[in-house]
Each structure stands twice: as structure tokens, then as C-alpha cells.
């Protein structure tokens, strides 16, 4: 069957080979473990049970997870094996369950979650994507996902294309986040500060790209001034050749302060910030977990 699940709509027959996402039809994962370095409300004190899917429908040149997004490395698992992996993480104390880079598995993931969710006894399910999701696909997740954690990477379509995403990223991601908010309009936390439901929109501030950040924040504000935003400072040059000079260095404090100031200047209220010390390769999972 040809795949049109994500906005790329490449039409690949993933029973026979991989599509633009570099992933087969079956679930393929590169890492699964307790992850402590998401937003505090996602990780909690005991970590989120994070499942990193192999492949991606974007090709951003600066991707920190390029070992899996760019190469498609990982291990194919059955639904039964994935269920066992998730419940092993829950037994170890996971306060949320996160599916990372899931956009190219959205249809089988919806079917999987319909069976899994009733067994989790209320543990929130987090859909952590790059933001390049199809609205049609997201509608299949309505009632199955408790927390949406999308990126809104680019406000500038030319920059999106230049950095290896797609020129339509801003409009596609806008429609996707709008759908996510329509499904989970109220962001709710429990007494321990762990998120129970809602949407948090992430934006990674890139060095030399403050105007892109301003454009992105302008768009995010259109979702409402109360929207939760995670303004990330964790960029570091990945260990591969990058042709853009600005992406060969880390973010400066001055650049990040400009982003924070603009966040408040345009009337946004709720969010998460980072110290520049978050730009540390040690916070990136070991994607050699599965051989």
C-alpha cells in the first residue's frame, strides 16, 4: 500500500522499501529509555518513557538526532514488542510516555494507541513531533493523545527550504498545531507539576537566525497569548559537515536574550526557557541502544 500519511505524500510502497522518511512500514525504533531532559512537566522527577522512532519526514541540516533521522538506523519491532518496551519503562517509573518523531507512523500509531491507552491507567501519552504533520493524520489521534509537543521550527519559508526542511513548513506546521490545540485546548498539570493534557509548542533558537525566531513566535502567538511555548537554547553543532557558517557555532547569550525579550514583547505569557548549558551533546540519547 502506498503511503500518504505525512505532508510529504511521497507515495512510497513501504511494504517493499522506505519512503522519504527512510522508514519501513513496520515500527522501527532507535532508542527507548527513561528520558530526563525534556521540559520538567514532561519528564517529571522519574523521567518520561521515550520511544524514538527511526527516520523523519524532514531533513534539517542541524538535527541533533541525525543518527536516526538521517540514516534510518534502528530495529524493527512488532506491536507486542513495543508494548512490552513501554510497560517496562512504566514499571521503572515513567510518569509520561513519549513517542518521538512519530509523524511518518501516524496511522499505525493511532491503531496501536487505541489498544495501548486503556492499559496505561491514565499515564499521559505525549506526541513529540517536528511539527510537519498532516491534519488528516492528526484527526486519527483525537482522543488517543493527551499531550502534543510539536516543534514550530521555521517562521521563514525560505530558511526552512535552505536548511533542509520544506518551503511549506510554516503553513503545514501552523495547520498541524492548530489541529492539536483543537483536540487539547486546555493545558493541565497535576499537583506535582506533571502535564496531564494540553499542547506545548517548541521552538529551537538557531544562531544567526533571530528573525526566524521572531517570525515563528509571531505565528505561535496567533494560537492565543496563553499558549505554552518552550523556547529552546540547546542548539550545538552536530558532528557532521555543515555548510552554513552560523550553524557551526553555538547560540550566544545575547541572541537567546533577544528571543526571550521578544516573547514577552509580543504578549506571550506561558512557557519554558533553558540555560545555554543545555547545549550539551551529553543530553542527546545514545542511539546505539538498538543494534
Image (cartoon, grey):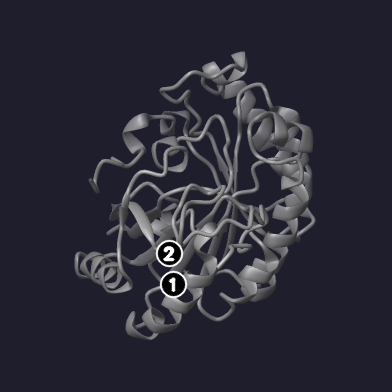
Which residue: 63% across, 62% down? 4
Q: Residue lying furthest top in this view?
A: 245
Q: Is residue 265 left or right of residue 112?
A: right
Residues packed near mark 1 inside 10 Å, few (<14), some (14 to 19) or many (20 plus): few
Q: Position of residue 159 (x, y in %)?
A: 73, 31
Given the current orientation, which residue lies at the most extreme front position?
A: 16
Which quadrant holds the N terminus? Answer: bottom right
Label 2 close to label 1 by CB (< 8 Å) = yes
- Quick one: 180 or 157, which is closer to the camera? 157
- Residue 289 visible in this rendered orientation of the protein: yes
Q: Secondary structure at mark 2?
A: loop
Where's residue 17, x and y in %?
A: 47, 53
Determine whether the residue tagged by mark 1 lies in a helix, strand or loop.
loop
Q: Is residue 41 left or right of residue 282?
A: right
Instruction: Give the alpha-carbon distance from disc 2 to disc 1, as whole Å.
Output: 5 Å
- Residue at image mark 2: 193
Q: Mark 2, residues whose alpha carbon is within 10 Å: few (<14), some, or many (≥20)? A: few
* One can see residue 146 in this view: no
- In the figure, 131 relative to 213: above or below? below
| Residue drawn at (50%, 30%) of the image | 235
Left or right: where does residue 169 sit relative to residue 91? right
The circle on residue 126 is none
> Residue tagged by mark 1?
190
Q: Is residue 72 above or below residue 145?
A: above
Could you say where residue 171 lies in the image, as x and y percent from the top left?
78, 51
Amino acid at each position: 500500500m502506498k503511503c500518504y500519511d505525512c505532508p510529504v505524500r511521497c507515495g512510497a510502497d513501504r511494504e517493499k522499501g522506505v519512503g522519504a522518511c527512510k522508514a519501513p512500514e513496520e515500527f522501527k525504533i532507535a532508542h527507548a529509555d527513561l528520558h530526563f531532559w525534556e521540559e520538567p512537566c514532561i519528564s517529571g522527577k522519574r523521567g518520561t518513557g521515550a520511544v524514538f522512532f527511526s527516520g523523519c519526514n524532514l531533513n534539517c541540516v542541524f538535527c541533533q538526532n541525525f543518527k536516526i533521522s538521517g540514516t534510518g538506523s534502528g530495529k524493527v519491532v512488532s506491536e507486542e514488542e513495543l508494548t512490552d518496551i513501554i510497560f517496562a519503562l512504566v514499571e521503572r517509573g515513567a510518569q509520561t510516555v513519549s513517542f518521538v518523531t512519530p509523524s511518518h507512523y501516524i496511522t499505525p500509531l493511532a491503531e496501536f494507541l487505541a489498544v495501548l491507552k486503556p492499559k496505561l491507567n491514565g499515564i499521559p501519552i505525549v506526541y513529540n513531533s517536528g511539527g510537519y504533520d498532516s491534519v488528516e493524520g492528526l484527526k486519527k489521534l483525537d482522543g488517543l493523545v493527551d499531550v502534543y509537543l510539536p516543534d514550530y521550527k521555521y517562521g521563514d519559508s525560505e530558511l526552512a527550504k535552505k536548511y533542509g526542511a520544506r518551503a511549506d513548513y510554516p503553513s503545514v506546521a501552523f495547520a498541524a498545531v492548530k489541529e492539536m490545540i483543537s483536540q487539547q485546548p486546555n493545558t493541565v498539570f497535576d499537583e506535582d507539576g506533571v502535564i496531564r493534557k494540553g499542547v506545548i509548542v517548541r521552538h529551537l533558537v538557531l544562531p544567526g537566525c533571530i528573525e526566524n525566531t521572531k517570525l515563528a513566535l509571531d505565528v505561535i502567538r496567533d494560537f492565543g497569548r496563553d499558549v505554552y511555548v518552550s523556547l529552546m537554547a540547546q542548539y550545538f553543532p552536530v558532528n557532521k559537515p555543515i555548510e552554513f557558517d552560523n550553524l557551526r557555532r553555538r547560540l550566544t547569550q545575547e541572541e537567546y536574550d533577544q528571543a526571550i525579550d521578544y516573547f514577552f514583547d509580543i504578549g506571550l505569557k506561558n512557557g519554558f526557557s533553558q540555560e545555554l548549558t543545555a547545549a550539551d551533546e551529553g543530553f542527546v540519547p545514545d542511539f546505539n541502544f538498538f543494534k
